[in-house]
Structure formats: C-alpha cells, structure tokens
Image (cartoon, rainbow, N blue to C red):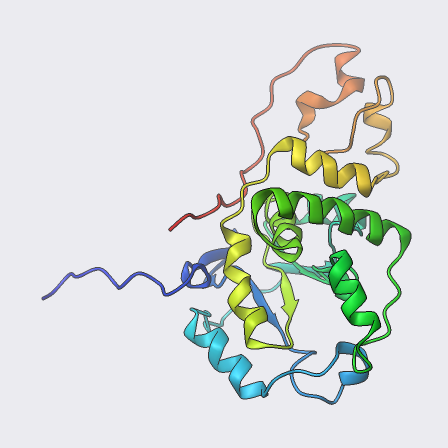
Amino acid sequence: MVFQTAPKPRSLLGWHRILSPTASVKVSPICLGGISIGNAWKFYTGKNEDPFKLLDAFYELGDARQHGLTPFSVYQGNWNAAMRDMEGEAIHMCEDQGMAVIPWGALGSGSLLTAEQRKERENDPDAPDIKPSETALKTSEALEKIATRKGTTLQAIALAYLFHQTTYVFPIVGVNTVEHIKAMPEALRIKLSKEEIDEIHDASPYNPGFPMNFTQYIQPVKYDLSWTPADHQQYQMAAWIDAPPKSLPYQPRTE
C-alpha cells in the first residue's frame, strides 16, 4: 500500500532529532562513544565485549547514520552534572549561533557511580583507576537518590540532566557491554522537576563568573541556563521588561 507510515522505532534511540538549527541532518539522541570500543585502551576505559556486538546492538536499537553536516553546527566539550563549566559561556554561544551541544564525559568519564558501583570497581583488577573528585562524589549521591525515587539508574538521571538544560544536546556515551547500550533509552523517558535539578545543583554548585554572576548580584539566586534578559537584575533597577522564553528542551518520550 502506498503512503504508509514507517514502522515505529524499536527503541527510543530510533526517534531521531534535528541535530541543530544550522544542520538538517537527523540523528539518534545519544552518540556512541568510540574510545571504549576495543581493548587498546582497556587500561583507561576497562575491558569490553566484542566490538562488533556493541555496534550491532546500537544499530539495531535505532542509531542514525546520516552525514553531511555544515560547518560549525556542533560544539563538543566536557560537560556533566558534576562539571558544569560549559554552562557559563559555551552553551549560551551554542544557543546564539544555532549549534548543537555534544558533551563528552557526559557520565563523568566513569566518576558518576552509585555507592555499590564504586565498591565493585575497587574490587575489579581490570577496572580503570579513576579517583572521583569530592564534587563528583556528592553529585553521584544526589543522582543516586533521584534515581532510587524514580526506579531507574544513576546514569540515566545523569544523562537526563543534560537533556533538560538546553534544546540540542546529544551526549557521547562510552560503553563496555551490550547491557550499557540497552540502558541508554531509559534516559530519554525521564522527566526531571525543577526541584530535582536543584538537588543536583546543590551537590554541584557553579559560579558562572563575570558577567553572568554580575547580572544577579543584587539578590543572589542559583544560576540557571533558562535565564533570559527579563531575569537580568541590573535591568530591573531601571525598568521591567518582557522577553520570550528560550527554546524548550526535547520532551521525554513515554512510548
């Protein structure tokens, strides 16, 4: 029959998203990190399953393979719930220039773990020797509490946090097993409340530096990527203005 709709994707990884306002290509919401595939870097990333099994699993779950990006359509940087430096200027630049954000280290390069996962790593001779920072530990605790309440994984919450911060976010996630890949779609289902994001921010406080902190120094408030000129306290000393809200993040999918 002509004009039939395409079959629904096998998983949420198959619901493709526009990469950025300056690129028409549609891609899977999560990037497969390549540095952990194979065993050449196992001293750093840990041992993993057969690389072809990992690639086959990702493809079968709906990975997009289109190419043809225009220049300066994406910005790639180190960003996660415990390392928020990109929230100061880089993400604002991306929003202004119509660029997508592709975070590497989206799961803290292996430092965002549950208490049980940290114990398992300590007892695993093949595990990479990663010493989490104090901020990473506190952030992990906050993520684990939220994950427990929602009946999901810490890693899913960590990825969901990034998805909630701005519109065009496509995290790079390194994997060691097929189970890691199968767990990816869970992050696309999760809805975080403002209070839950505040919990994460309390564990990982961030000062964006000048000039962003100067705009809010009259009545200090928590830094928020959703701010618009209407939230600028310096403006409010002279007048009150309206400003349209920023573009919303992609909303979680339940199907």
The residue nearer to you, when weighing 12 against 132, is: 132
Which residue: 72% across, 10% down? 239
- Picture coordinates of residue 124 (x, y %)? 79, 77
- Picture coordinates of residue 125 (x, y %)? 82, 81
Please state if 110 lies on the left or on the right of 25 as rendered. right
Instruction: Give residue 101's quadrant in the image.
Output: bottom right
Which residue: 44% across, 59% down? 12
The residue nearer to you, when weighing 181 against 122, is: 122
Q: Quadrant of the N terminus?
A: bottom left
Looking at the image, can residue 131 be seen?
yes
Instruction: Give residue 32's quadrant in the image.
Output: bottom right
Q: Is residue 228 above or below residue 160?
A: above
Q: Residue furthest left?
A: 1
Which residue: 70% across, 78% down? 35
Which residue: 15% across, 61% down? 3
Please state if 129 lies on the left or on the right of 174 as rendered. right
Q: Is residue 252 above or below residue 2?
A: above
- Picture coordinates of residue 112 (x, y %)? 76, 58
Please state if 90 lies on the left or on the right of 101 as rendered. right
Q: Is residue 47 above or below residue 76?
A: below
Q: Is residue 138 above or below residue 50?
A: above
Looking at the image, can residue 95 be seen?
no
